[in-house]
Image (cartoon, rainbow, N blue to C red):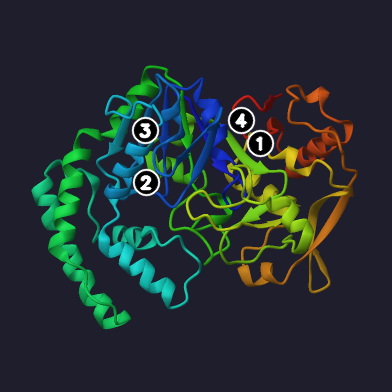
Amino acid sequence: MSITVLLGAQWGDEGKGRITDALAAEADLVARFNGGDNAGHSITIGARVVKLHLIPSGILREGCLNVIGNGVVVNPINALREIAEVRAAGVDVSPRRLRISQAAHVILPGHLALDAAREAQGGIGTTKRGIGPAYSDKVARLGVRAGAMADPRAFGEAVRQHTVRVNRLLEAEFDQPPLDADAAAESYAEAAEQLRPFLDNTFQVIHNALRDGLRVLAEGAQATLLDIDHGTYPFVTSSNATVGGVLTGLGVPPQAIRRVIGVCKAFTTRVGGGPFVTELEGELALRLRGTGANPWDEYGTTTGRPRRVGWLDLVALRYAVQLNGITELALTKLDVLCGLNPVRLCTAYRHNGETLTWFPQDSDVLAECAPIYEDLPGWSEDVRNVRRFKDLPVHAQRFVERVESLAGAPVRLISVGPEREQLIWR
């Protein structure tokens, strides 16, 4: 048995989609293990940009089976919309190539309404896609599983009952108007009719693949620092975005995992609220963020929100390496640093006069930390056409090597642009 895990090693948006796309060229099955359609992966293929939110990135590789695992929460309406969009891009999205776990939980209309109501009262900056409320209902044993869509009429009735229950909460706690329970039931029943051919026992699908010696790639959404247990709580997502989420989100044993690839940018970004030690403002922040004119710029795939940006935080990255047992790193957006001098790396934090080399688990402490930087010489050469590590500018090579040394894991893959071929393999 052999599973390669690919997950975010920062606060998300590291470019996991394009790295998954590259690795999927040698995979037989790609499985998504956590999150919902609040995630966003942009993959550039020539002049075409394909944006994926729920469907695994392996869908863009012919011959690759794609699985939405039990640890994912699925919005049926948005799933159908995404399937239609990907099909419009000329990609085969059929039950032959995409399976949805019967044990995955469904995002219902009430979840969307509750998410929006809580954000209106002063939330943490969620995408308002209903992710948190769906996971809350799952834990409270009030959720509806995707397997219920096998019987669209019964599924619609479950949606209606759930909506009636949520309406009482919306009116009593948030002073919000009630949802139309009958309309919600009808639209979800129609969606179930279209999605039920995709439903499967994905536990069996994955274990059959492992038994047969097929190559399995587990794809994560969000990232380590957004993990519900190990991230910067409460400014986190509602699922386990770390390696443990693979075990529960797909139903696989730990010994099946042989390779863990952490994706990180050559700098740091995050979306929404929460502490961010290396955050930059002003012209330098604008330079790192870009203008939003192309998919390589720092604007959310799902929300379009500008991302907060800062220098690469090696304290946080080292934490991600240790926590996930990362065996190798994929470093993205090295090209964005071209022309900057010096290039800075945060190697430790300063807190109340003390030097911290460990990542604090208390977000209040993290918010009080100041970065301690190590400056490296920059480079002015354009690296977008480089395909071999030795052909990178010397200072770019030294930057990568220093990241390896401080993070505690080798950098095996470097992206120098958004296109499929703009990758350096080491």
State the image quarter where residue 264 is shown. top right
The residue pinned by badge 1 equals 329
> Which label belongs to residue 419?
4
Location of the C terminus by quadrant is top right
Q: Along the polypeptide, which appears first: circle 2 or circle 1?
A: 2
Q: Is residue 94 left or right of residue 150?
A: right
Q: Residues within 10 Å of mark 1 (few under 14, many from 20)?
A: many
Q: What residue sits right under mark 3 in the picture?
A: 88
SS label for mark 4: loop
Residue 160, percent across and down?
14, 61
Please, what is the three-letter code of the amino acid marked with disc 4?
A: Glu
* Secondary structure under the numbered disc 3 in the rendered image: helix
Asked whether, in this view, residue 369 is left or right of residue 86, the answer is: right
Which quarter of the figure has residue 425? top right
Alpha carbon distance from label 4 to label 2? 30 Å
- For label 2, the SS is loop
Quadrant of the drawing holding the N terminus: top left
Look at the image and tell me whether residue 148 can be seen.
no
Q: Earlier in the sequence, mark 4 or mark 1?
A: 1
